[in-house]
Image (cartoon, rainbow, N blue to C red):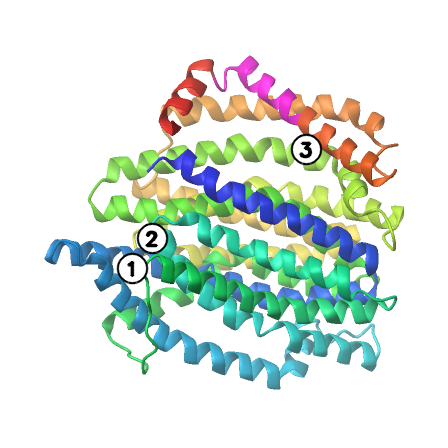
Amino acid sequence: MNLTKALGSVGGLTLASRVLGLVRDSLFFRFVGANFASDAFQIAFRLPNMFRALFAEGAFSAAFIPMFNRKVAEGDKAAEGTGLAHGLAFAENALSVLLPVLIVMTAIVELAAWPVTWVQTFGYGKGTAAQFDYIVLLNRLTFPYLLFISLVSLLGGILNSLHRFWVNAAAPILLNLTLIVALLFFHTHDPMATARNQAIAVTVAGILQFVWLWWACRRAGVRLRLKRPVINDDVKRLMKLILPAAAGAGAVQINLVISTALAARFLPEGSVSYIYAADRLNQLPLGLIGIGLGTVLLPTVSRLLGAGKEVEAMETQNRGMELALLLTLPATVALIVCGQPIVAALFEHGKFTATNSYYTAQALAAFSIGLPSYILVKVLTPGYYARADTRTPVRYATWSMLVNLGLNLIFIWWLGHMGPPLATAIASTVNVVLLYRTLARRGHFVADAQLRRRSWRMLVAALLMGGAMALLNARFQPYVTGTNVERWGALIILVATGMLVYAVATFATGAFRLGDIKRLVRRNS
């Protein structure tokens, strides 16, 4: 399977989802603004998002996909053509245990929403009792999303293992479309009512995503039966792998939850929204590059290792690292240098003011420092998960979370709303360094000559682009707060100019040559 082609399929759909996400956020801040109502919604939506990253998409996929692929390979070895049936039998057993756990967990959080919210916001001591009760209500409305998105993760993991990457990658588009429809047709003059309607739409979106994946599985000939829970050796092994993988896969989300809680407790009203808006922009390249690479690398590397092809597996990881740096370095520099006009173009209208844009751009710059590390985590962890090692990433994620907590407590008093994002960026960098060193020490990842040659050249190209964009920033500023046509036109030209400058710089520095492009075209044709 061609890594670039697969990434293009997943990345293109993820990009569409992220663009729709920016449209959604732009509408949200237009109708709600950066205030208590927006802070409350971000706090409530963060909880199911954290569990989604820890136990659904992150941990479950990391543990389930390699085991599913192994079962398929074992079935094919036993009798050609029976591999999928073996894999689906394992998936049915996993579903029989996963579904009751999800139902019980959802019920517990619904009943205990008050203490959960208290812990989540460190008591929310700066607000009134009515405000706290409102956050509790939003938590109850959004949390059922976890139940449906976890089932989506199971079905998506099966489809990814069958190399039907695009179906699962398209699912988040339904979330953004649902929230956009809710904003357009159910917004009111009361920001709290609009935020409440968004919370309801989150759970509706989870149901739609589940229906989409269920239909796609039926089309692919995948039919899972509901059965009484079966806890056999395979399910025990899956459960054993999930818990450590949860912290390893969700380190960034856990760090964001800590940052959000500290901001909700100690920083002025609106700070949670600044951090959220900045994170959403930071998530655009992360979703396009990191999640796409992680989605493709895990089943690919696990399948190669299962076939005993160690050399090919390491080659795939090297090219994954190369692609990550090629796309991440310019995004990092661009978000730091051009953060102010980007934020203004997307969010500065309606109830979202110029002051809100300024503070959001500051938080974005702090987040973006860690963008390469956020994405490299997605590239490096498949090297562990494909070898059924979920414990090592969790140890390093734990260290990362401790670093994040310590730096948060220091930076929040010194840098205000910039403190939590900067702490998250540094903590993620610590995680990457530990993951890389251990893979290299074990001989599971060695940077080849091509990766070493290109890496520093790509960094120079990104810095050259940053210098050029810094000189052009002032020319775009008057247009990014104009009419919709002016602001979107200015944003498109700004991004296109940066991409053109970076492309020229990569050839000028020798990071890429014309022959590389020709070979890439031939592979994908």
Question: Does residue 489 appear left or right of residue 71 in this picture?
Answer: right
**Residue type for callout 3:** Ala
Image spot of residue 375 (x, y percent): 52, 43
Give the residue drawn at x 35%, y 51%: 384
Q: Where is residue 439 shown, x and y percent of the image?
A: 36, 44
The relative height of residue 285 versus residue 63 in the rendered view (above or below) is above
Whether residue 315 appears in magenta in the rendering, the answer is: no
Mark 3 → mark 2, Cα distance in angstroms: 35 Å
Q: Earlier in the sequence, mark 3 or mark 2?
A: 2
| Residue, disc 1 | 68
What residue would you read off at disc 2?
161
Q: Identify the mark nearer the N-term, 3 or 1.
A: 1
Mark 3 to mark 1 CA distance (whole Å): 40 Å
Of tags 3 and 1, the one toward the viewer is: 1
- Which quadrant is the C terminus positioned in? top left
Task: State if disc 2 and disc 1 touch (CB < 8 Å).
Answer: yes
Q: Secondary structure at mark 2?
A: helix
Q: Is residue 435 visible?
A: no
Q: Position of residue 476 (x, y in %)?
A: 82, 29
| Left or right: 101 as drawn, with respect to 422 | left
Which residue bears the numbered disc 3? 334
The stretch in magenta equals 498-512
> Label 1 to label 2, Cα distance in Å?
8 Å
- On the question of residue 450 being in view, the answer is yes
Q: Amino acid at mark 2?
A: Ser
Q: Residues within 10 Å of mark 2 (few under 14, many from 20)?
A: many
Q: 185 or 48: which is nearer to us?
A: 185
- For this orientation, the residue located farthest to the left is 78
Label 3 Cα crowd, 10 Å radius (few <14 / some 14-19 / many 20+):
many
